[in-house]
Image (cartoon, rainbow, N blue to C red):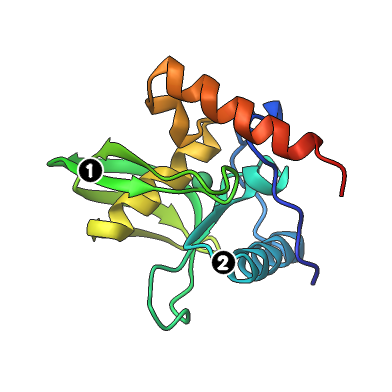
Amino acid sequence: MPVLPILKYPDSRLHTIARAVTRFDGELNSLVRDLARTMYHASGIGLAATQVDVHRRVLVVDVSESRDQLMVIVNPVLVEGVGESELDEGCLSVPGIYERVSRFDQVVIRAQDANGDSRDIAAGGLLSVCLQHEMDHLEGRVFVEYLSRLKQTRIAAKLGKQSRRPR
Ligand code: NI
């Protein structure tokens, strides 16, 4: 169970649209385990498969303080979104950048678990924002794309420079 490398913005692979999961098998289980391990290792609250260059509709989330409330979300669909919430967001693919993004305050997401069982998840606050952020990744969207063109250019330049630096 390795910790997987996380793609960093502006890597174009982050713009890939993920495909639905159709087989709930051992391969999916090991992807879920690797995603969870990678998310916890990086101290993140959410990670989409897109971010580890696996273009399947799978994400893991844990917004708990105790870091023991793992949610495994497969093939998520937004059923309902109401209200407006603005939180500073960060992303493991955009290290060191925190910016305010406007999202639904409350959402209902229909998703399967790792066994393929479907359920509706009602979420508010941080979990709601986190789910919307991670679901964007599956559509090839990174949160900085909600910011002004100028900010995006600055962030891309900053991160691009970092990744070219020799180790
Ligand atoms: Ni992210």
104 or 77, which lies in front?
104
68 in relation to 38, above or below = below
62 in relation to 47, above or below = below
Residue type, numbered disc 2: Asn
Residue type, numbered disc 1: Glu
* Residue 79 visible somewhere in the drawing: yes
Residue tagged by mark 1? 86
Residue tagged by mark 2? 115
Which quadrant of the view contains residue 147? top left
Q: Residue at x 46, y 32 (%)?
A: 144
63 in relation to 94, above or below = below
**Location of residue 117 in the rendering, given as x and y in whole percent from the top left corner:** 47, 63
**Location of residue 100 in the rendering, given as x and y in whole percent from the top left corner:** 31, 40
144 or 127, which lies in front?
144
Q: Quadrant of the N terminus?
A: bottom right
26 or 91, which lies in front?
91
Report crowding for label 1: few under 14, some 14 to 19, many 20 or more residues within 10 A (C-alpha).
Answer: some
Ligand 1 contact, mark 2 (Cβ < 8 Å): no
- Residue lying furthest top in this view? 149
Q: Earlier in the sequence, mark 2 or mark 1?
A: 1
Q: Residue at x 38, y 53 (%)?
A: 130
